[in-house]
Image (spheres, rainbow, N blue to C red):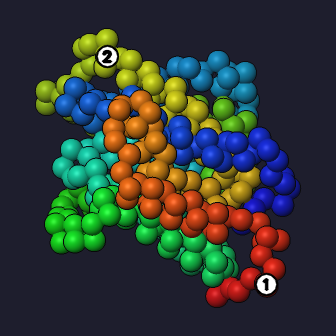
Amino acid sequence: MQDEKKRPITFDWILFFAAPCLFSSNLIFGRGIQGEIGPFITAFIRWAGALLLIAPLIYQDRRACLAFIRHHTLLWLMLGILGMGICGGFVYWALTVTTASNATLIYTTSSLFIILFQWMFQGRRLIVREILGMMIAFTGVAVIVLKGDVGALRHLHFNIGDLGMLAAAIAFAVYSMLLRHPAVSTVAPFSLFGLLALSGALVLLPPALIEVAQGGLLPTTGTSYIKLAGIIVFASIMAFYSFQHSVRVFGPAMAGTTLYLMPPVSIIMAVLFLGERFESYHAVGIALVMAGVILATAPITVFKSKKTVL
């Protein structure tokens, strides 16, 4: 539900639509990183690097940060485990044993889990047009993933990696909801991100060390470091800041709809920066996704009829 204390302004909407673009920058910087660096090593470097860049801001806001860690230790660690650990290293690992198509389709269900959990545990009302919009958007994602071929459903095979992506989708939903905890608003957004990067790095350190001990690959080339830098700056710091801001202003359910925009944005970025072809099914999928997101997120005043709730 939208935050009553802060009405959305232009800047809020800019960050709302920037979030999927920044998250999708993984397509540019993360392409080919699999096989070059171990998954948990990648995730640890990602959040440790983000922490180093944000450290000056944490120091300036150290009183609020220390108070948050001291009085809300469990919340702090849970946000790190869910948002950076499971949705970081665990996702990188899952992608080594499942297909990108399966991963994309499963991960976008996170916004569905957000609404489901809010309905189950927070008494959130289910708005019919919102559910319909999400179904349309999910159909658009499926069109993109299946390349417009419904028959491809017969060839989708699910494995343990898919279960890992499902766990990540659920974890991201819980993470989004926890971001609305009153204690979170006591810390400035960038300082909060730094604290979460710290907790994420802490929880990822043990599996990263185990991966190194077992011969996990470390970055050794300039290209690898450039990719990591892009992931740290764009897909981590800027992306999570935009998403956290969207959660504060619009609420977790509406912010979660940005996940549906990631596949279309990834396609456009692949065409622009990687020279990939734009197919007709891409256009259909993007149209469905945009229509669904607009229907699910448009202000109630846009609709003349009274909204129906379940």
Circle 2 is placed at which residue position? 223
Residue 242 lies in quadrant: top right
Q: Which mark is residue 142?
A: none
Mark 2 or mark 1, earlier in chain: 2
- State the residue at coordinates (20%, 59%): 160
Q: Percent position (x, y) of residue 126? A: 63, 80
Q: Percent position (x, y) of residue 284? A: 44, 61
Mark 1 secondary-structure assignment: loop
Single out the residue that lies furthest toward the front.
280
- State the residue at coordinates (54%, 70%): 134
The quarter of the picture where the C terminus appears is bottom right
Does residue 6 lie above or below 38 as drawn?
below
Does residue 122 lie above or below 246 as drawn?
below
Does residue 92 lie above or below 310 as drawn?
above
Horizontal side of residue 226 vs 309, given as left or right: left
- State the residue at coordinates (67%, 42%): 15
Kindly tell me whether residue 244 is visible in this rendering.
no
Horizontal side of residue 233 vs 217, given as left or right: right
Q: Alpha-carbon neighbours of circle 1 within 10 Å: few (<14), some, or many (≥20)?
A: few
Residue 213 lies in quadrant: top left
Circle 1 is placed at which residue position? 305
- Give the alpha-carbon distance from disc 2 to disc 1, as whole Å: 55 Å
- State the residue at coordinates (43%, 69%): 139
Kindly tell me whether residue 15 is visible in this rendering.
yes
Q: Which amino acid does label 2 sit on?
A: Thr
Q: Which amino acid does label 1 sit on?
A: Ser
| Residue in front for this viewpoint, 55 or 115 | 115
Q: Which of marks 2 and 1 is in front?
A: 1
Mark 2 secondary-structure assignment: helix
